[in-house]
Amino acid sequence: MKVALVTDSITQFGGAHRFLVSLCKLFPKSDIFTAIYDKRVDINKELSGHKIFSSFLGHPFLRPIFKNHYTILSPLAFESFDFSKYNLVISITAGAAKGIITPVSCKHVNIILTPVRYYWKLDNPDFYTKNIGIRKLFKPIFAFTDAYVRQWDFAAAKRPDVNISISSYISTISEKIYGIKSDILAPPVELNVKPDTTSANKLIAELSINNQQPINDFYIIVTRLYPYKRADLAILAFKRLRKHLLIVGSGPEEKSLKKLAGNSKFIHFLQFLPDGVMYALVKAAKGFIHCGIEDFGIAMVESIFLSTPVIAYDLGGASDIVKKGVSGMLFKSASALCVKRTVEEFEGSALFKSGVSAKVVAEYKDRYSLKTFKEGLEKQAGIKVPMTAAADKIALVRDDQGFVGRSLRGEGD
């Protein structure tokens, strides 16, 4: 059986691409289709052995313009792919990848990371106008093209045979926007390297020297610095708390966030760090802070794996992940004052003193394991995925949509 994996783009390493790597482990002989493929991305070593097909948007002239954005050309890019040789296609998408056209004999399973943020107003549209110059210049024209893309996106959401959402939050808003029902299946999460304690301690020592005071106890944020991540709330809260906050990540909001932090000796920007160093810092932190509405929240799960409690906004993926008093704390209002009060409440709790227990860590590792994901995918998508089998040993099984497969074990493609 031939299997294809489809993703919006491969231009930077993030949660969607960690997910793609996990699927590659389950389907080691699968081909990969994407609108734009940047061979310089760190994920490439994880994709070795897979054929990767990109669209015309990957042309050297077009790639710099469209590499991070869902455009009027994205539908055409994904509709141009030919899946006539495949029996199973799995798309992982926050954009146009769900809109591929597959033959009747091919089962299309779509994993919804999120509806398209800009077109469905899940983020502040002013951010896109501010950070994409061409949108500001041609704003009246884009008002018409955006309406077309929304219509296409709505129709494209109905094309997959099976839709799966990565959290309760995404399932709810997908039903509201697209009118589709989807089962919930969390992505698999794993720590890909061991914590690099030596390098992390060296980094903290350097920060202490530069700060002219020791940094012993600290909290941490690991995120791309975009408006919807709401790192501004954490900065304001920790300035008032006068507690150290490490911010690992970068993005278009970095300049304005540094301005907000001002000369505070308690807010520290660290850019992106190697995973080993980042994991060691998370493990050493008193708590992991997340103030935005996350579609899922891989970094929050990783923090719990490292026994560090999560303090997060009680909306989005955090509501599925964090259990109050067991693996973290949740705050109900997106305000700096609410963040501050929740941190103060956390510091008076038993969880602050003990961290996440070994028993709870083990439960989370099982809950978000590749094995658990595989079993959920089999049940929800109606496919059989032997844990150690290659893609040509996967069999489709009968489901309520009439897809029937035969065992292909021992047969060629």
Image (cartoon, rainbow, N blue to C red):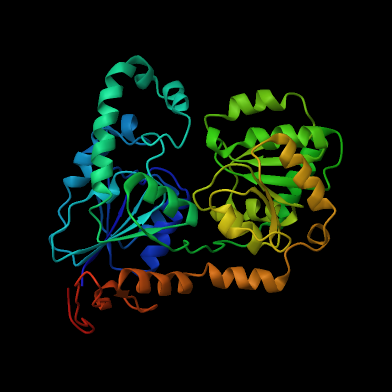
Instruction: Report the side of 59 relative to 271 (left or right).
Output: left
Instruction: Report the side of 49 relative to 300 (left or right).
Output: left
Which is nearer the eye, 210 or 20?
20
Badge count = 0
Which image quadrant: the C terminus? bottom left
Taking the image as drawn, is residue 43 in sight?
yes
Residue 203 spot, x, y in % from top left: 73, 45
Which is nearer the eye, 208 or 377?
377
Taking the image as drawn, is residue 61 in sight?
no
Which is nearer the eye, 180 or 188?
180
Which is nearer the eye, 32 or 189?
189
Q: Residue at x 30, y 42 (%)?
A: 36
Q: Residue at x 46, y 47 (%)?
A: 13
Residue 144, placed above or below residue 108: above
Instruction: Report the side of 311 relative to 64 (left or right).
Output: right
Which image quadrant: the N terminus? bottom left
Instruction: Report the side of 188 relative to 341 (left or right).
Output: left
Residue 136 spot, x, y in % from top left: 38, 17
Q: In the picture, residue 125 is in which quadrant?
A: top left
Residue 386 spot, x, y in % from top left: 35, 79
Q: Residue at x 67, y 23 (%)?
A: 259
Residue 163, placed above or below residue 36: below
Q: In the picture, residue 406 is in which quadrant?
A: bottom left
Q: In the picture, residue 103 is in which quadrant?
A: bottom left
Residue 338 spot, x, y in % from top left: 72, 40
